Amino acid sequence: MARYSGPVCRFCRREGAKLFLKGDRCLTDKCAFERKGYAPGQHGQKRGKVSEYGSQLREKQKVKRVYGMLERQFRLTFARSANERGVTSDIFFRNLELRLDSVVYRMGFARSRNEARQVVRHNHIHVNGKRCNIPSAKMSIGDEIALAPKDAKAGMFSLASELYAKRATLPWFQVDHTKSSGKVVSNPTRDDIHMPVKERLIVELYSK
């Protein structure tokens, strides 16, 4: 499976916003965005005027990097969302949130989406009682997600649950960390996704 494996802190600096790509590190003084809140590179502190296309591109890149997806997969997800009935931007974000790796992160079984993807690929996650190692698998209402019984008490998952306690709870799922399991109870809405993104610009970019 293709994925980006380079440094990610530069993404926050490039997009001018904290994307929380490194979990608990983003909450400390070691956060690169806090230390150097300007774009990376030789001319990072000399940003010029951004064009209309540039604004659309930056919003798209911001969301793509938050969810840790490559361009082809991101574009295909948007195309499928555009073919569904309803508001395209809302459906798009719902489909992104219902990816298994994103659900694992939201439920507090991983400290970041990148770690969640690794947790899924390494067979630590069961969906409806069966092992699932596909990060892009789409979850539905009623699906139960749980840690494999042999992994429930691992140290990394304890750290993830501690970090989860510091985040705002979301209404579209229920989770019980004492049982290392959770359940999707409704579809996430755009209001549930606290992300400073102008989704209208993404729709305009892909509608050209």
Image (cartoon, rainbow, N blue to C red):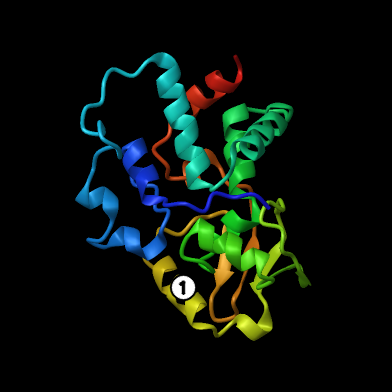
Q: Nearer the viewer, residue 207 or 84?
A: 207
Q: How many marks?
A: 1
**Disc 1 packing (10 Å; few <14; some 14–19; many ≥20):** some
Residue 71 shows in the view? yes
The amino acid pointed to by label 1 is: Ser
Task: Give the residue drawn at x 43%, y 75%.
Answer: 159
Where's residue 107, x and y in %? Answer: 54, 64
**Left or right for 51, reference 206:** left
Location of mark 1 (residue):
161
The kind of secondary structure element at disc 1 is helix
Task: Give the residue drawn at x 31%, y 37%.
Answer: 16
Q: Examine the rendered structure and indicate whether residue 146 appears above or below residue 117.
A: below
Task: Give the residue drawn at x 47%, y 60%.
Answer: 112
Q: Quadrant of the C terminus?
A: top right
**Left or right for 98, reference 201:** right
**Left or right for 79, reference 107:** right
Where's residue 161, x and y in %? Answer: 46, 73
Task: Give the residue drawn at x 54%, y 20%.
Answer: 205
Quarter of the image for residue 49 reads top left
Where's residue 199, x and y in %? Answer: 49, 29
Q: Examine the rendered structure and indicate whether residue 83 appears above or below residue 5.
A: above
